[in-house]
Image (cartoon, rainbow, N blue to C red):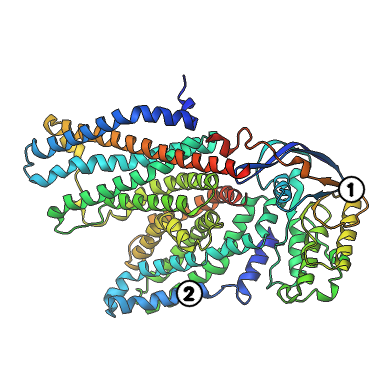
Amino acid sequence: MTLTVTNLTIIRGGLPVLADVSFVLETGQALILRGPNGVGKTTLLRTIAGLQPSLNGKVSGAQDQIAYAAHSDGLKAMLSVTENLSFWAEVFGQSDISHALAAFELENLSDRLAGTLSAGQKRRLGLSAVAGDRTAHLGSDEPTVSLDTTSVAMFAVAVESHLKSGGMALIATHIDLGIEQANVLDVTPFIARNDVAMGSSVEAFL
Amino acid sequence: MSLWEYANPVKFLRLSERVLPMLWVLAISSTVVGLLWGFFFTPDDIRQGSTVKIIYIHVPAALMAINAWFMMLVASLIWLIRRHHVSALAAKAAAPVGVVMTLIALITGAIWGQPMWGTWWVWDPRLTSFLILFLFYLGYIALWEAIEDSDTAADLTAVLCMVGSVFAVLSRYAVNFWNQGLHQGTSIPVATGERSVADVFFVPLLISMVGLGLLFFALTLYRTGTEIRMRRTKALLAREGRN
Amino acid sequence: MKALLIRDIRLAVRAGGGFGLGLAFFLIVIVMVPFAVGADTGLLSKIAPGVLWIGALLACLLSLDRLLALDFEDGTLDLLATAPLPLEAALSVKALAHWITTGLPLVIAAPVLGVLMNLPTQGYVWLVLSLLLGTPALSVIGTFGAALTVGIKRGGLLLSLLVLPLYLPTLIFGAEAAQRGAAGADASTPMLLLAGISAATIALMPFASAAVLKVNLR
């Protein structure tokens, strides 16, 4: 399973932000997206995951298997840790959450309501809901916000084990996660320079 | 030379600028001629006296109320399928004109019926259907206003127009069903049905219908031009902002 | 899919989930009616089927903005949209959960409130049956409205403006069926038409709902 992105031009608010992005991602690989704030990493992830249309270019391969996870991670305060995790596990076709609980050291918290966790614990829970899963490929947007170094390490380990079992990961982050199989793509060179591109909404009116 | 050329906003603007002056003249003159002729130069009705003359506004307005929605439906489909911005903006521009036509139809319908019914409103199936159409128009316009991003608004309102059309037709049948049991004799007689034989009534009616149709066309064309100019301004500003 | 259903039901039932609010609202509306129109039991008994239908419909309407807005804000919808499950199916399941936690309780409460409205004895069965057949349509149509307005801040009022005209056919046939039943007349035609509307909307609305939700997730 290969994710191939060819000459992708993505838009935000009718104007192109990144143009002609190309890369190839194989199973077992991770790609780290780097770049200054606002450059378009989130838009790129969302476009690849299929949530937003692109202006030009193609995404082929594993596109419909990418789960997009950002800060707001779909956790419900009134459900327990176990209930939250089992829900997302089932949605993505899994049934066993013990790996996820162990990987992020959440076993002691398994019956606590998610709303009673600390911020860091909530982030770990959010990550475990998506990173713990073996079948979907991971598109992750700034996953390590408000995590301490131990938790960041836990995330890196979980991603590595996800990669080893045949997943792929696309992660936008400023932090060096220390993942072995990761390549880094700095998206700054792809910033769209021309003011409008063919076919964009804005261009139609000029 | 295909009609699709005018999907280009700039070409559309140029065409409408050329066409509008004459269109306004035609529209206003035929409307005025139709109404004046109908009101002052036709004989009174035996049964209804002179109040029946209100059909010269009521029927054309009612017709346009429905045609306007139908035009919005077609424009919405064109937007969804071919992504022509002019089409989406034309639907947006037509809606307020349509809602006013609906309102005129409702008010003139009530005025017409008052002498017969003794009250300003009855839940006659036809009038009720127009009231429901009025609500659909309001919802459509409100949705356009509530959403910031133009393309998102265009997509959402287009789907709403389609779903709304299905439910509007469904409501028509439901309302007919619902009013079966109620007072039968109060429905407004079909104006064209009773009068199409008599030329003296029909010709001014026809002229009014044409006039109001042209008026709708002119107003919508004008308003679409305004919408295009607003989008153009936003696009130019956006380009400025980037450089 | 089952997981989504169970989760939504759990969330609705737990504290702060909003379960019971619909019922309370239904009760309050019905209680207000005699205060507004007078306590003449003859009048109340005549308008009972229609008023009960309106009360149930409004109670359904009020719980709609919780349906998708919360999931939109916390990223659940993004994840669901990119999950293996088709969005149409997910929305159908959410509508089902809405019906189970809002519509169904209203159906059960209706006969009780019917007593307050002096509903004729023969009308109870028809009222319950019409609500049972009609409330699923209300949930499914409401889901469409919720998907349409999910991105709009404080879009509750706009949601009502958009959804209420769409509710009219269901209301007309449902109330007519309940009315005829209460009067002892044959209610089969409106009942069948009501069932038809429910079936058609359950089958078709999820596609429209998914389409507009995808637009809002862009």
Tell whether B38 sits left or right of B27: left
Foreground: disc 1 or disc 2: 1
Q: Secondary structure at mark 2?
A: helix
Q: Position of residue C137 (x, y in %)?
A: 49, 57
Marker disc for residue C109: 2
> Residue placed farthest to the top in the image?
B1
- Label 2 Cα neighbours within 10 Å, binned few <14 / some 14-19 / many ≥20: some
Q: Is residue C117 visible?
A: no
Q: Position of residue C190 (x, y in %)?
A: 39, 56
Q: Position of residue B14 (x, y in %)?
A: 42, 28
Mark 1 lies on residue: A28
C-alpha distance separating marks 1 and 2: 56 Å
Residue kind at label 2, given as amino acid type: Ala
User: Mark 1 near mark 2, Cβ–Cβ under 8 Å?
Assistant: no
Q: Secondary structure at mark 1?
A: loop
Instruction: Name the one closer to the observer, B18 or B54.
Output: B18
Instruction: Name the one closer to the observer, A52 or C81.
Output: A52
Q: Residue at x 63, y 68 (%)?
A: C9
The quarter in which the C terminus of chain B is drawn is: top right
Chain identity of mark 2: C
